[in-house]
Every structure is written in structure tokens, then in C-alpha cells.
Image (cartoon, rainbow, N blue to C red):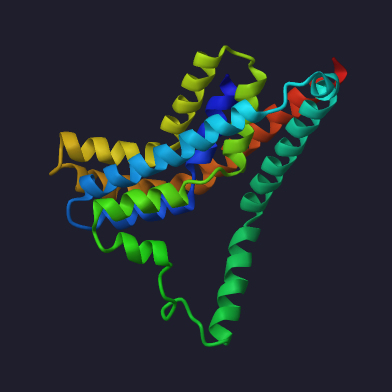
């Protein structure tokens, strides 16, 4: 269960979600816009999550290879998480972005002239109906989400409990949108100031927390995979 929670927190670190939330916070009626986006995201993410988790093969043929396949998947995911942590720790991701930025500027396509993506332009129109559609279209399963669904499947709980776990996974995964929405509803005047402070804090500490989170996740998955192979 701990791995499921950790994967849900990892899945929440979605750059698109952060960007969408930031855009909506700067528009009029941000709570209405975020509510529309959140409902669209819930519909897509929970529906796909339930379809995926219940479509995992449970045949006898699959069960005979489960002791080999599942640990291999855990070890592979753990290795990817550790590799990502290493890239962040060494700063290679920053160098890669700098090289890409330099190539674009050399071609006359600097970031200052680059047009925002279409979904961001649509969000800027300030319509709750639009944010609902954008949230539904952009909230697709990522690697951490699929890994979390795999772990939920491995728990072998009953159908109602599995459904609750998938829903709970999504609630945790979308906390970057849920928290500011709840704050706007409860304290609309205090929230903008608090969000600015939170954004400043995250910008200072997000890199370090991402490295630690990915490292812990990678180690846990690899240990789980090795134990599964041994047993």
C-alpha cells in the first residue's frame, strides 16, 4: 500500500497539471475554471484507471508467469526511477534543456517568439466548459499512474475495494489542483497570497524533493522485485 501512495504522489508531479493550474489561477473566476478542469480530469483518469486495472489478465497462463513477470516489471520501473533521480542530481536535464533552447534560438525560434500550446490558449479563454474539456483530454495515464494501477492489481483486493483505491489514487494524484480549489472556496481573499508563497517555496525545493522521492521509489521497487524473484 505504501508503494501505491508513493506512486500517486509521483504521478501528481505533472508539468502539464502545474502549468494548467497556474494559468487558471491568473484568470477571472479561478475556482469555477479549476472545478471544470478537475471534473474533466476525474472522468478521464478514473474511467481509464478502472478499465486498465480490471483488464489485467487473470488467466491461469498469466498466473504461472506472474512470479517472474511482476518482479521484472518492479525492477525495471525501479531502474527507471533511479535513472531519473541520477539525471536530476547531476543536472543533466538542465544542460539538455539549455542545448535545446540554444538550438531553437539558433534557428530563430526563441522562447520569446514561441506560441503557447493550443490547450493553454483555450484555457486562457476563461470558460468552465472549456477547462472541463481540456482537463478530460490532458489527463491521460502516465508511467507512474500505470505503475500504481499495477500495484493496486497486485494487492488482489475485492472489486469494491479496488474501485475505492483507484478513486483514492486519483484524488491524491490531482492534489495540485484540489488544494488551491478548496482554498479558493474557503478563503478566496487569502488564497492568492498563500499560493504565491507556496509557488516560491516549491521552486526552491521541488528539485531536491523530486530526487529523494524518485530515489526512494526506485530502491523500494528494486527490493520488491528482487524479493519476488528469490521467492
Q: Residue 76: x percent and y percent?
A: 76, 38
Observer-nearest residue: 138 or 133? 133
- From the viewer's perspective, is residue 164 above or below residue 196? above
Residue at figure coordinates x 67%, y 20% from the top left: 154
Residue at figure coordinates x 62%, y 73% from the top left: 99
- From the viewer's perspective, is residue 107 above or below residue 35? below
Q: Residue 19: x percent and y percent?
A: 40, 55
**Residue 130 in sight here:** yes
Instruction: Tell me the quarter of the picture where residue 231 sits.
Output: top right
Q: Is residue 147 left or right of residue 193?
A: right
- Residue furthest out toward the top: 158
Residue at figure coordinates x 58%, y 70% from the top left: 98
Q: Residue 142: x percent and y percent?
A: 58, 44
**Residue 203 in sight here:** no
Q: Is residue 16 left or right of residue 21?
A: right
Q: Residue 110: x percent and y percent?
A: 48, 80
Observer-nearest residue: 122 or 187? 122
Amino acid at each position: 500500500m505504501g508503494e501505491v501512495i508513493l506512486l500517486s504522489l509521483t504521478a501528481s508531479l505533472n508539468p502539464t497539471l502545474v502549468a494548467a493550474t497556474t494559468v487558471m489561477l491568473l484568470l477571472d473566476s479561478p475556482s469555477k475554471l479549476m472545478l471544470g478542469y478537475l471534473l474533466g480530469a476525474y472522468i478521464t483518469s478514473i474511467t481509464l484507471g478502472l478499465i486498465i486495472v480490471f483488464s489485467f489478465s487473470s488467466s491461469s497462463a498469466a498466473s504461472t508467469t506472474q512470479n517472474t513477470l511482476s518482479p521484472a516489471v518492479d525492477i525495471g520501473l525501479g531502474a527507471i526511477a533511479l535513472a531519473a533521480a541520477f539525471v536530476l542530481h547531476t543536472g543533466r536535464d538542465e544542460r539538455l534543456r539549455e542545448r535545446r533552447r540554444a538550438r531553437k534560438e539558433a534557428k530563430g525560434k526563441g522562447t520569446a517568439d514561441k506560441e503557447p500550446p493550443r490547450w493553454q490558449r483555450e484555457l486562457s479563454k476563461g470558460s468552465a466548459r472549456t477547462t472541463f474539456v481540456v482537463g478530460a483530454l490532458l489527463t491521460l495515464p502516465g508511467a507512474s499512474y500505470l505503475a500504481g494501477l499495477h500495484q493496486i492489481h497486485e494487492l488482489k483486493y475485492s472489486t469494491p475495494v479496488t474501485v475505492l483505491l483507484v478513486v483514492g489514487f486519483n484524488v491524491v494524484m490531482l492534489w495540485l489542483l484540489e488544494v488551491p480549489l478548496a482554498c479558493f472556496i474557503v478563503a478566496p481573499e487569502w488564497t492568492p497570497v498563500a499560493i504565491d508563497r507556496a509557488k516560491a517555496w516549491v521552486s526552491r525545493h521541488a528539485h531536491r524533493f523530486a530526487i529523494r522521492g524518485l530515489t526512494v521509489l526506485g530502491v523500494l521497487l528494486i527490493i520488491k522485485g528482487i524479493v519476488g524473484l528469490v521467492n
